[in-house]
Amino acid sequence: MDEDKALRRARGLLAKAEDWATPEPEREALTEKAMALIAAYGIDRARLAHAGKIQDRISHIRVSIDSPYSKPKGQLLWAVADPLRCKAVLHTARGGGHRVDSATVVGYQSDLERVQLLYTSLLLQAVNQLKDVRPDPDAWYEDDGVRAYRTAWLAGFRSSVHQRLTAAEQSAVDADPGETGSTVEPGTALMLVDRKAQVDAFYADLFPDAKTIRRRRFNASAYSDGHRAGERADLGSAKVDGRRGVIER
């Protein structure tokens, strides 16, 4: 798979999908095609690296996270990174509290590239929609307010994105000819498991004291609204904003 051609095609598909003048069924179809292409590209890079035909080292990226809603924005980074076999950790602002100011993402360089492409686009989409979302007065406790609704909405959006990317990655593995295995090369799934294990070990060395974020309960209606928005989201044409960076847990 030609690297430049593959990424140009994915960006083109996603650019069309991001255009709200495009009918929704067409946007969804374009998004699914782009997701499949990006997933196949990741497997292609991994196989070439395994064969020694390209260099694809484990690395890490530091990413700035903007307020407001910095924690759910950071968790969206994790939702993109995790299916693409990367690890992400959130860094809280000085003085403690719940505000996140940056994140570090660990993974193979080709996978970090894919995460950057996807996350930048998804963050823009989520933020643009977040400006307009409001709770339904009949399905929301008034005291919770708009901020609580939007936090739950982002959680639903994140969950949908994670599910869709996980499914796209698995479909790419299942469709890859290398999954049948041979006496020369491992099956695709086994090769990717090994890469993931190496990323996990690298991450553990960098962040031996990292803690898992405790799960929260969210209002069901806001979470569902965000989940449906995530199902419609375009997963990839990235107009990269250098201030934001990319990834997280």
Image (cartoon, rainbow, N blue to C red):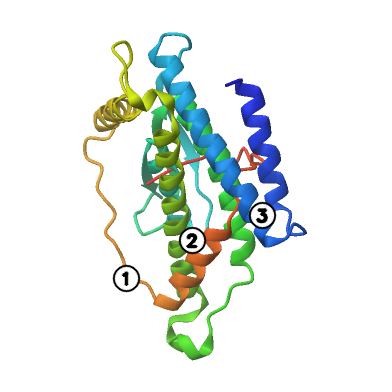
> Quadrant location of residue 144?
bottom left
User: Which residue corresponds to mark 1?
Assistant: 217
Q: Residue furthest right?
A: 21
**Amino acid type of the residue tagged 1 in the rendering:** Arg
User: Which residue corresponds to mark 3?
Assistant: 27
Classify residue 174 as left or right of residue 15: left
Label 1 residue SS = loop
Do residues under tags 2 and 1 come within 8 Å of each other at their CB atoms?
no
Q: Is residue 12 above or below residue 98?
A: above
Classify residue 68 as left or right of residue 216: right
Residue at the spot 35% in from the left edge and 59% down from the top edge: 97
Q: How far apart are marks 3 and 2 (CA)?
A: 17 Å
Task: Find residue 79 and name its label.
Answer: none
Q: In this view, does 135 lie above or below 9?
A: below
Image quadrant occupied by the N terminus: top right
Q: Distance between the residues labelled 1 and 3?
A: 31 Å
Residue at the spot 48% in from the left edge and 68% down from the top edge: 153
Q: Residue furthest left?
A: 209
Residue at the spot 52% in from the left edge and 89% down from the top edge: 137
- Tell me if residue 244 can be seen: no
Label 2 crowd bin: few (<14), some (14–19), many (20+), radius 10 Å? many
Q: Position of residue 47 (x, y in %)?
A: 42, 19
The residue closer to the viewer here, 233 or 25, is 25
User: Which residue corresponds to mark 2?
Assistant: 157
- Mark earlier in primary sequence (2, 1): 2
Q: Where is residue 217 in the image (x, y as percent from the top left)?
A: 32, 71
Residue at the spot 63% in from the left edge and 37% down from the top edge: 10
- Mark earlier in primary sequence (1, 3): 3
Q: Is residue 194 above or below residue 77?
A: above
> Quadrant location of residue 127?
bottom right
**Amino acid type of the residue tagged 2 in the rendering:** Phe
